[in-house]
Image (cartoon, rainbow, N blue to C red):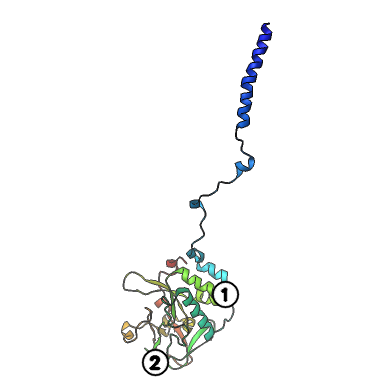
Amino acid sequence: LAHYLAYLLFFLAYTIFGTGVIKLHTNKKVHTPEKAQAPKKLKKSEEVKAPEKEELYNYKRSYLKKHFGCAEKFKEDLPVHSKETWKKYRDTYVSVVGEAESTIGDPEADFDGFGDISHFAKQSPGKGRGIFAGQDIAQDTLMWNGSRSAQFKDAHSFQKFLFDLEDDYLACDPLQWSYIFDLNKGKGKPDLRIVTDLDEGSFCNNGKSTGNMGYLDVSFEKERPRQNGIRPLFATRGIRKGEEILCRYGEFVANYGWSAFGM
């Protein structure tokens, strides 16, 4: 009888507590492998943002030269630009910076920084393209005034200009020609610009200290107002007809260089 009672108590205990345990287990929420591995959905504040417009043109000059293939192109005898090509440069510049910020005047007008000085461009032996005097020019004559010099206040605008040309050859030339100019040189805090001369002044090769076109004392600038802050260039000596016109790069290129624009 004792064995029978023990067996009966065991059976009742199992029925009451055992089925309850089973019920608790069967009601427990089980995560499927798919749900357990699903990535957490980002909140709006955590979502990856698209790059700002300015970041799309954040390149070093070395990268840009490789991108446009400039090294190979400069091994060729590149053509002297036609009026149509200069017009494309000017129109593209104005479309990037806007008319209000443009420093080149009417892009459609037929003039350049040389004014009435007769000149022409052609290949210069061992130097690439160059500019030459089309007349005899007396010493101290005003030769070039920067009226077609495009100024860029930031690297983004300059780089957008290069890409908007949609021509690798045309993009390589400004990369080679452009320079950093300080509009406030000698007057205080630097006011730097990326400058691209959008006329045949860009073909002026470097004559260093013996260059025949350069700055004179500011007294020579009387009645010759600077064009958008660019100092005019004069004949530093007499220049004969047919002689190559040579600049003095060290006079107008800012010491701060391209690093000031992150390029």
> Where is residue 238, by image quadrant?
bottom left
Residue 247 is tagged as: none
The residue closer to the viewer here, 257 or 248, is 257
> Where is 124 relative to 50, above or below?
below
Q: Which residue matches tag 2? A: 138
User: Which residue corresponds to the image point at 64% horizontal and 16% vertical from the top-left?
Assistant: 12
Rate crowding at label 2 as few (under 14), some (14 to 19) or many (20 or more) other CA atoms within 10 Å.
Answer: some
Badge 1 marks a residue whose secondary structure is helix
Q: Indicate the position of residue 77 as horizontal and vertical percent values.
A: 58, 81
Q: Is residue 81 visible?
A: no
Percent across and percent down for residue 99 are: 43, 77
Q: Residue furthest top?
A: 1
Nearest to the observer: residue 135 or residue 183? 183
Q: Quadrant of residue 148?
A: bottom left
Residue at 48 percent across and 52 percent down: it is: 45
Whole-percent x and y of residue 155?
46, 69
What amino acid is at disc 2?
A: Ala
Q: Is residue 88 visible?
A: yes
Q: Amino acid at mark 1?
A: Asp
Is 73 above or below relative to 14? below
Considering depth in this image, is 18 or 242 the residue closer to the camera?
18
Indicate the quadrant where residue 210 lies.
bottom left
Q: Nearer the viewer, mark 2 or mark 1?
A: 1
The numbered mark, 2 or 1, whose residue comes first in the sequence reads 2
* Residue 5 higher or lower than 187, as above or below: above
At a point 32% along the width and 87% down the height, the residue shown is 223
Say which quadrant the N terminus sits in. Answer: top right
Mark 2 falls on what kind of element?
Answer: loop
* Residue corresponding to mark 1: 168
